[in-house]
Amino acid sequence: MTLVGRPVPDPVIYRGPLGQITRSIEPYTDSDPIGIHASVLALLGAIVGREPHVEFEAYQPLLIWPILLGDTNLGRKGSATNHAIRLFETAFPKFMQQRVQPSLPASGAAIISGTVTRAIRLEGADAFEDNEEYDMEDDEGEAGPPKSGVKTYVSKPGFRGAWLAREMKTFLQRSKMDSTMAGTLREMWEGQRVDSETKKEHYALVDPHVALICHIPPEEFVLNYSASDAAGGSMNRMLPIFVHRSKILKFPRKLPASVMDKNVRALIRMVEFAEKCGELEPDAAALKLWDERLWEELDTESNKNKIMKQFAGRVMPYTWRLAGLYALGRCSSTISVADLESAAAVAQYMMKTVEHVFNEYQVETKAMPERKVEPFPFDGDPSLAKEAKVAKLVEIAKAAGEAGEKSGKFLQNMNIDKDMLNHVGAAAQAQGLVKRYRLSRGSAGGHTYLIVYTGPTDEESPVEEMPKPAKRFVAPVEVAEERLTPEPAAVVTPKRAASPVPSPQPKIRTKPLPAQAKVAPKPPVKKVNGGGSSGLLAGFFS
């Protein structure tokens, strides 16, 4: 069964022993082979650890983070990953039981503290009282004196594990409320140390090696994806893979024991070889292929348009990570032409997935009721604001783009009160970096305050936009620019200092509202700073 218009994987993806594993499972399931293959690659990359790596620009561990994008029921996302899980549970039961978690923690701090707690349980570590051996940074970014009573928990280097984020929608929604989430994931994809500090505890996750497998329907992915996700840099660490039911199989049968045993033995050989393997290097023919053809093809496609740039910014190192996995599949430390071609085919399929999803799965939205906007400058004392706090405010505002961000998010992510936000905002405002606006009272009866970045922006060359979707879907309805400009007679200018740098009115983001649905009150959001785990064994992995 073929979905008309869907991206089609190049058959070279299924070369070698890893491809043979996927092909051996295919007759017994209606799951998409590319979904099974991506899940197998991710779990293999997690279990082999940090030692096998490729040197491309920097140290590249063989971690990949696939996102399986498929329609509900027809995508067979869960079925594809489950086949890979059953295979690895048979081959490596202890790893799968102790180190694979069924969901992603709720914040960047919880990811760090929970993973450190799990690592200490399994591998042991030292706990340092009062930070005697670790200099912490103060609010100005400079090393300060040890903080009395703070315990530091440090994992041993190279903790291996995996997360299964079967509800990626929740993760995307949380990442909009937690500015530390994207930064934490960026560092973990690189395999670098990440830290989380509260008033009583400091957690340090040293050189983690954790895979991530996500599931989400394409419509929800497009709807919940935002410019702030792209600005945070976490999206180009992901590997979007479109999946769809491969055939109609009315009674899928269990994988025969002989097939399972053969695949298990192959995986065990790969992992045993990886334990003795260090750097994986390309041979001369593979380097020639990269220099003469593949680099140019991938570079051209990854810079095709703005959306592609946001997702394919790491396509080059991703290709070499995948090539390293294909070489491990052959139990070789040399990356061949076949390995590199297979890896490039996966990377190219990722880019086809991005183009397909953002062309075909636009979601109809309903415009919010019109609300007027008026300037509402900060009137705090800039001398009371610390430079680190000003930089953090500017960072959040810049990530939000021209639409601006509500003041509540700044209060939450910066761990400050309204008075301090007024002082910090006044300092940034004096430098011409931000501007504050007030929206007229909405249906809830309260004012909404927006903080908009007005400083210098990175220059970008014009990019070609993707073609409009077919009539099958309706493009999002945007609020007209002129609606946001208050009529002169309707604006009452508050008695506050005028903003030093004029800037355009912000665009108000619109969100879809279900018909005749009541909006439930939002649950309280746990703060990142000061709201971490309260003990060595506390956290997500309890």
Image (spheres, rainbow, N blue to C red):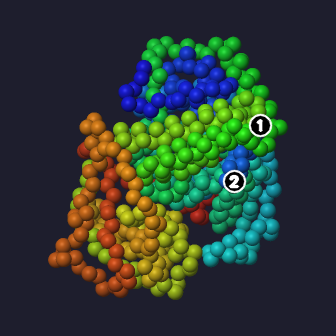
Left or right relative to 475: residue 414 = right
Give me the disc on residue 58: 2
Q: Residue furthest right?
A: 276
Q: Is residue 188 visible?
A: yes
Q: Is residue 453 above or below residue 243?
A: below
| Spot occupied by residue 257 in the image (x, y as percentages of width and height) | 68, 14
Left or right relative to 464: residue 326 = right
Nearer the observer, 512 or 280: 280
Q: Amino acid at mark 1?
A: Ser
Nearer the observer, 322 or 164: 322
| Spot occupied by residue 137 in the image (x, y as percentages of width and height) | 68, 72
Identify residue for label 1.
Answer: 333
Quadrant occupied by the C terminus: top right
Q: Is residue 167 visible?
A: no
Q: Residue at x 40, y 55 (%)?
A: 463
Left or right relative to 303: residue 533 = right
Quadrant occupied by the N terminus: top left
Rate crowding at label 2 as few (under 14), some (14 to 19) or many (20 or more) other CA atoms within 10 Å.
Answer: few
